[in-house]
Image: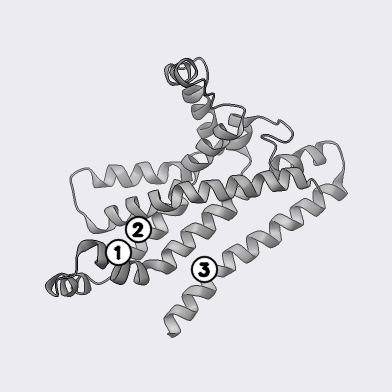
C-alpha cells in the first residue's frame, strides 16, 4: 500500500472540497434562484468538465497554466508561482474538474425549495442572510452533502487530469490512482489490488452517505 500517495490524495480531496464548497453554494444557489439571458450557456459551461474526456481537459489546463502560456509567465515573473507539476497545479485542475459534481447537486437542491417559503420569510421581515441560514440551507443540505461527498470521492479516484497537469512525482503529485497504474505496469498486482480495494470501499461508503441522509431527511 502506497500510504504516501493515499495521503496525498486525501489532502488533495480535502483541499478541493474546501475551495469548491463555498463556490458551489454561491454558484448553485445563484443558478437556482435567478433567471437571466445566457443562463443556459452558464449551465452548459458548468457541465463541460463532466462530459469532456479527462485527458483533454488536462491538456487544455496544462497549456493554459504552463510556463509558456501568458498566464503561466505572468504568475512566475510576478509571484514566482508555477501551476504545473506540483500540488498547486493539481488543486487548480481538481477544482475545475469537480465543478459539476458540486454545483449541480446544490443547484437542484435549491431549485426544490418552494418559492412560497421564501416569499413568506420575506413578508415576515427575515433578512436575505437570515433566510439563507434559517430557511434555504436547512432545506437544501441533502444536496449540499451529496455534492460535497461526490467531490471528495471523485477527487480520490481521478487519474487523467492529475496525470496531465501534475505528472508522476513521488510525494508531490503521485496520487493513489496514479500509484495503482504504476503498480499494474510493474506487475505488482498485490499492491494494486490492495489500493484498488481501499478506493472501492471509500467510494461505496461515499455514495451511500447521501442516499442514507436523504432517506432519513424524507422520513423526518
Considering only order in the chain, which callout, 3 or 1, is on the residue closer to the N terminus?
A: 1
Q: Which residue is mark 3?
A: 210
Q: Are marks 1 and 3 in contact (CB under 8 Å)?
A: no
Considering only order in the chain, which callout, 3 or 2, is on the residue closer to the N terminus?
A: 2
**Distance from the alpha carbon under mark 2 to that under mark 1:** 6 Å
Q: Please, what secondary structure does the residue beneath circle 3 have? A: helix
Is any atom of residue 112 visible in this view? no
Q: From the top left corner, tell me how far across and down residue 10 is, in percent.
A: 64, 50
Splitting the image into 4 quarters, where does residue 179 fall?
top right
Q: Please, what secondary structure does the residue beneath circle 2 have? A: helix
Q: From the top left corner, tell me how far across and down residue 15 is, in percent.
A: 54, 46
Q: Residue at x 72, y 36 (%)?
A: 171
Q: Nearer the viewer, residue 176 or 7?
A: 7
Q: Nearer the viewer, residue 191 or 4?
A: 4
**Distance from the alpha carbon under mark 1 to that under mark 3:** 18 Å
Q: Nearer the viewer, residue 3 or 202?
A: 3
Q: Please, what secondary structure does the residue beneath circle 1 have? A: helix
Residue 178 lies left or right of residue 67; in this view the side is right
The disc label shown at residue 107, or none:
2
Q: Which residue is mark 1?
A: 111
Residue 110 lies left or right of residue 184; in this view the side is left
Amino acid at each position: 500500500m502506497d500510504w504516501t500517495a493515499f495521503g496525498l490524495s486525501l489532502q488533495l480531496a480535502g483541499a478541493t472540497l474546501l475551495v469548491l464548497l463555498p463556490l458551489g453554494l454561491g454558484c448553485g444557489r445563484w443558478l437556482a434562484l435567478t433567471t437571466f439571458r445566457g443562463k443556459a450557456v452558464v449551465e452548459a459551461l458548468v457541465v463541460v468538465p463532466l462530459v469532456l474526456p479527462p485527458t483533454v481537459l488536462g491538456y487544455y489546463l496544462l497549456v493554459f497554466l504552463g510556463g509558456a502560456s501568458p498566464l503561466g509567465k505572468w504568475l512566475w515573473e510576478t509571484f514566482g508561482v508555477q501551476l504545473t507539476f506540483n500540488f498547486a497545479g493539481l488543486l487548480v485542475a481538481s477544482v475545475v474538474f469537480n465543478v459539476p459534481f458540486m454545483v449541480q447537486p446544490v443547484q437542484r437542491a435549491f431549485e426544490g425549495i418552494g418559492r412560497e417559503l421564501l416569499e413568506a420569510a420575506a413578508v415576515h421581515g427575515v433578512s436575505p442572510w437570515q433566510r439563507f441560514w434559517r430557511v434555504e440551507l436547512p432545506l437544501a443540505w441533502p444536496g449540499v452533502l451529496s455534492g460535497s461527498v461526490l467531490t471528495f470521492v471523485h477527487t480520490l479516484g481521478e487519474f487523467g487530469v492529475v496525470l496531465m497537469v501534475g505528472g508522476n512525482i513521488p510525494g508531490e503529485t503521485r496520487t493513489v490512482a496514479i500509484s495503482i497504474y504504476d503498480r499494474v505496469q510493474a506487475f505488482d498486482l498485490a499492491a494494486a489490488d490492495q489500493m484498488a480495494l481501499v478506493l472501492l470501499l471509500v467510494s461505496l461508503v461515499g455514495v451511500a452517505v447521501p442516499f442514507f441522509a436523504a432517506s432519513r431527511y424524507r422520513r423526518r
